[in-house]
Image (spheres, rainbow, N blue to C red):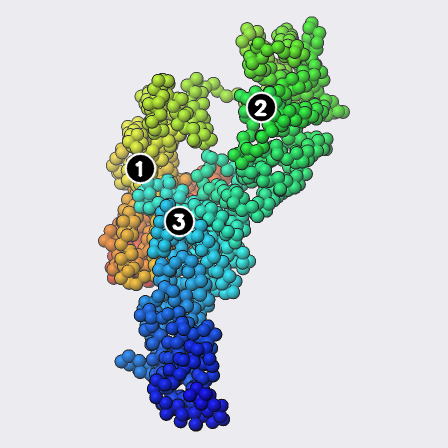
Amino acid sequence: MDQKILSLAAEKTADKLQEFLQTLREGDLTNLLQNQAVKGKVAGALLRAIFKGSPCSEEAGTLRRRKIYTCCIQLVESGDLQKEIASEIIGLLMLEAHHFPGPLLVELANEFISAVREGSLVNGKSLELLPIILTALATKKENLAYGKGVLSGEECKKQLINTLCSGRWDQQYVIQLTSMFKDVPLTAEEVEFVVEKALSMFSKMNLQEIPPLVYQLLVLSSKGSRKSVLEGIIAFFSALDKQHNEEQSGDELLDVVTVPSGELRHVEGTIILHIVFAIKLDYELGRELVKHLKVGQQGDSNNNLSPFSIALLLSVTRIQRFQDQVLDLLKTSVVKSFKDLQLLQGSKFLQNLVPHRSYVSTMILEVVKNSVHSWDHVTQGLVELGFILMDSYGPKKVLDGKTIETSPSLSRMPNQHACKLGANILLETFKIHEMIRQEILEQVLNRVVTRASSPISHFLDLLSNIVMYAPLVLQSCSSKVTEAFDYLSFLPLQTVQRLLKAVQPLLKVSMSMRDCLILVLRKAMFANQLDARKSAVAGFLLLLKNFKVLGSLSSSQCSQSLSVSQVHVDVHSHYNSVANETFCLEIMDSLRRCLSQQADVRLMLYEGFYDVLRRNSQLANSVMQTLLSQLKQFYEPKPDLLPPLKLEACILTQGDKISLQEPLDYLLCCIQHCLAWYKNTVIPLQQGEEEEEEEEAFYEDLDDILESITNRMIKSELEDFELDKSADFSQSTSIGIKNNICAFLVMGVCEVLIEYNFSISSFRVLLWRYTSIPTSVEESGKKEKGKSISLLCLEGLQKIFSAVQQFYQPKIQQFLRALDVTDKEGEEREDADVSVTQRTAFQIRQFQRSLLNLLSSQEEDFNSKEALLLVTVLTSLSKLLEPSSPQFVQMLSWTSKICKENSREDALFCKSLMNLLFSLHVSYKSPVILLRDLSQDIHGHLGDIDQDVEVEKTNHFAIVNLRTAAPTVCLLVLSQAEKVLEEVDWLITKLKGQVSQETLSEEASSQATLPNQPVEKAIIMQLGTLLTFFHELVQTALPSGSCVDTLLKDLCKMYTTLTALVRYYLQVCQSSGGIPKNMEKLVKLSGSHLTPLCYSFISYVQNKSKSLNYTGEKKEKPAAVATAMARVLRETKPIPNLIFAIEQYEKFLIHLSKKSKVNLMQHMKLSTSRDFKIKGNILDMVLREDGEDENEEGTASEHGGQNKEPAKKKRKK
């Protein structure tokens, strides 16, 4: 039969073939085809013949084709066919599909959809035919019966796709089903159907199956729905990361089977590569990614950013088109995150409302940690981001040439945090990725060398940490370090010292690097530039400190310690120590040559020798001998000659130029310190040991010389130094300059000898000799009024507490324990459990008692300086208290009580005490109630802007009095109010960001707004209380100056914040069903208690400025008038901004009234003080004034300009 069909098909016409096929029974043809296909024979040729004899123009042919299609699909799905045969059959079916009429295409498509939904597919090979069927169906123009209606081919295709996507998909066919849609022409809506279905399948698939599915989705995204694809992928893996981190044990990850962390990271890395590749082919996808993640910056960036999305962004930086905007996005997100953290840490109010979340900085460091799993595509982006953060937010140079360093005292600032994060990124990346190490080191060294004029301490710290991590590993990069050594002569001294200290561990493991440095330093020692020679000395001294000679005291372990990774460095420590001795003695020979150079170079040497001895005690003999031989050049050996020192030899005369050649006082100081150290440290250890007399000779010689100098200095008169009171000390003559230098040397020598002979009675005579030097030598203006012992002690205590908190944070517990004099050794174990808060509270009580004693004295006996220092100490200690502890509450109550019951007129003390109260209060709860009470006190003391109104004094806080109310307390409360407004504004921005990101249905979105209600209520409560605070201050007769200026600016900020809240309700009022009642009350309060009073206050300020104009020009001097006018201009400058802010607030209130159907404007009234009208009585008075025409014209034009805008506002009503 098959042969006959094939022979008939070979004829030119198909008539006979059609007739033959019609004579066959229903199952014969399908059985024949099945047998031929299974046997692997000419099934393709037979299928072509059948299609040739079954034209779609005839109904019988169409039906026959339909049965053949069904048969072939079943055959392919059965798995009984050879792969080549199955492919050939599917290919033929694809070619013939477009000949089918529409209804049969619908039937075929429905068969496939049913098979997919029922899970009856065996291998899914036949699914290759479905896109061809759907494409053919879309081309049919006639109307087709579908369900109960009639649809076009395109509409049928849409319905079929919708039905397919709404049904169940077997896990093994998800990738194939998603892939097939790339060959189907789809509308945007249809693409969305497919994308949503594929994304919903992520959680049901094995982790290893997700990357190919993502790839197919990215291919499909070229047809549309790019945003949905990216959002879905990022959301899934962000949630997966979060779940994985929470389940440290690595249990189930959502619905995916348990996988080790490494497998998850490899899958994420593969998906990131797929996305980056897709972006390279479709830039629109990249733009959509950046746009999607930028949205997070408007609200809460933590919602959009996750370790996965950050890793993705860092990988995208490899595409040049997106590099700058992605890095800028990450940089901005980092700083915003740190600013949010700073705001949260400083406000208990915000901490109660906003849940703690992980921050962008933590996520980035997590990306660095995850990148160990072959994420090479992320490393370059990490390095670039790290350097951008360090470059952008490192310490900056200020106007006077000093730098703001990244010190612990400033570590809370967002910029310093960002810089530190950049350093951590680079350090951790350096540790993990060997391939990038050389580039990081090269870039750090380049910045150290090329930015000599800018602060580079942060780069030097990073370099130090890198070297400390792995000095042995860095030997491979030694060429980069030796290149940097060539620039030492041109770098500032401080940079040289820190650079050499940073690379010091490298010098211990690399002989070639050490030799290279020695050559550079020796060359620098004879350079023309003084700084180069000083750098050489600094370098040599550093080497002497850190290359210990065998036998050096173990107690002087001050050298830079090495990390665990450097343990191999000291394996041959005995050999190293022996070799170090020769090395150090060579350096000492080089340094002796410095003793013939300028005074500044010698001075560096004298200041450094003492540290060298403490760290490398075996060099004592060499150092002391060097100092002894140097001193002998200026020492008069004959015991009877006065004076004992040759001061003339210390001064260099070159023509008319006179300068110091030998800083003899520093030489003696160095000798005295080294000698004292030697006596106290080395000699006790040598007792009982036989030592050569030569080694002790220098010690005895130096002791004898210092004793001789002391005795002869006591006998010497000033005339012996040619420094009697008649001597010339002017700086304009050579003799005067020389005498000045000599006088300073004598004073310095006396100071050293006083210290040396402290235990000998002769020091009193030396002190008299020291004080008898003519006072004209001393710098003028340096004398201060004497301080009491208690004041000096308090100053010392305050500096100690500050230093411990800044630089020794981890050791605060031990510090406080050492302060507790009641501790006994037997009780040490029991006290180990005492918390820092408890120990701090004990110390605080001591200072509280001292302050109470001071405050109990009379006003005239009140020591304000001591009180100020006590408050500073209490402020410093209070930072160590846990805000949730009862001790903190007690401290707050005590401070509040002090402010309420004590009235002092000292402004500085008041400011310090109030700052302490506010700092405590904000850590416990919002200070708005406190601000309201203080504003009432200020109003009561300063009076009302309407002189006819008598204000009742409230006296909540006695510290507020007529002397301190303004400007001290007024500026403090306004500053706090500004901080509260900043917090409220931050919350509103956060809420608006959440609303803009919601893409839910109306019902879902209305439910989503419910969690925001506590935040909205808190915002309204804060603004309501602040409104009453401003209500008091705008009625207060504030003095001209900073108070008025600050109040006007803060009022403007208040209205801006109110406007932001109104605009937020404009966004949500439809979904939430209106605005809350407390918002209506807030608007009513603003209309009745603030806006009218603001206009009155504006008039008050302007009237004061006008009265100043009139009185000033007639009576005051021109300079005084100019100063007053400048103050007036500064005060009135914020007025237009305030008026604009009020009008903006009212404008958006009108919009909200229309949208919410609530008349919010019924409580808003236009102030008559802004209506444009001619006041006859004032006009007559002005016209009668003589000689003031110009002044009055200026005033009238100003008045007209200010009142032009309200006229428009009246017309709008």
Q: Residues within 10 Å of mark 2 (few under 14, many from 20)?
A: many
Mark 2 vs mark 1, foreground winner is: 2
Q: Which residue is mark 1?
A: 924
Structural distance between the alpha carbons of marks 2 and 1: 49 Å
Residue at x 28% of width, y 44% of height? 1025
**Residue 1154 in which image quadrant:** bottom left
Looking at the image, residue 1204 lies above or below residue 958:
below
Left or right for 917, reference 53: left
Task: Give the residue type at disc 1.
Answer: Tyr
Residue 1139 is labelled as none
Q: Nearer the viewer, mark 2 or mark 3?
A: 2
Label 1, label 3: how far apart the Cα atoms are: 35 Å
Label at residue 1135: 3
Q: Position of residue 917 (x, y in %)?
A: 33, 33
Q: Amino acid at mark 3?
A: Ile
Element class at badge 3: helix
Q: Amino acid at mark 2?
A: Arg
Q: Nearer the viewer, residue 711 or 63?
A: 63
SS under mark 1? loop
Which circle's residue, 1 or 3, is located before the other in the chain? 1
Asked whether disc 1 touches disc 3, contact meaning CB atoms under 8 Å apart, the reply is: no
The quarter of the picture where the N terminus appears is bottom left
Q: Which residue is mark 2?
A: 615
